[in-house]
Image (cartoon, rainbow, N blue to C red):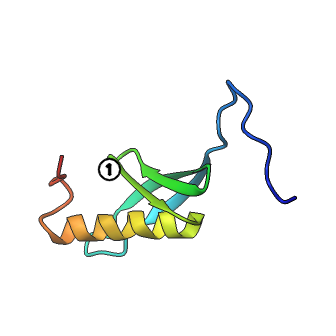
Amino acid sequence: MGRRAPPTPGRRPAIRKARGTAQASTNMQFSILTTKTESFYTACSPELALISYGVCRDEAVNNLQEEVLIREQAGGEGSHAQ
């Protein structure tokens, strides 16, 4: 009881869109897409090419925003580690 049925083959997971703002010196705007896969959540910012994970949606989004701040402080928006 309490378990969800396994995903239907060929069915795409629901993707939720939210607007995110990194509270840093530039106060830049970026979109955040979130989805749940099995037992964790994924947050992605396509514009910044970043992905983060968490056990709940808020944790995944917070992790993504924190990574944006860290990268911004480490050398600006354009310095993405590959």
Residue 39 x, y percent position in the rendering: 61, 56
- How many marks can you see? 1
Above/below status of 60 relative to 10: below
Residue drawn at x 67%, y 24% as measured from the top left: 10
Q: Can you name the residue that lies furthest to the left here?
A: 75
Above/below status of 18 relative to 46: below
Task: Give the quadrant of residue 29.
Answer: bottom left
> To which residue does mark 1 refer?
48
Q: Can you name the residue that lies furthest to the top here?
A: 10
Q: Amino acid at mark 1?
A: Leu
7 horizontally vs 76: left or right: right
Residue drawn at x 40%, y 63% as measured from the top left: 64
Residue drawn at x 31%, y 65% as measured from the top left: 67
Q: Secondary structure at mark 1?
A: loop
Seen from the viewer's position, the closer of residues 26 and 77 is: 77
Residue drawn at x 32%, y 50% as measured from the top left: 48
Quadrant for the N terminus, please.
Answer: bottom right
Above/below status of 1 relative to 13: below
Task: Give the quadrant of residue 52.
Answer: bottom left
Residue 4 x, y percent position in the rendering: 79, 50
Residue 77 x, y percent position in the rendering: 21, 58
Q: Can you name the residue that lies furthest to the right here?
A: 1
65 horizontally vs 25: left or right: right
Residue 35 x, y percent position in the rendering: 58, 49
Mark 1, Cα crowd under 10 Å, few <14 / some 14-19 / many 20+, is some
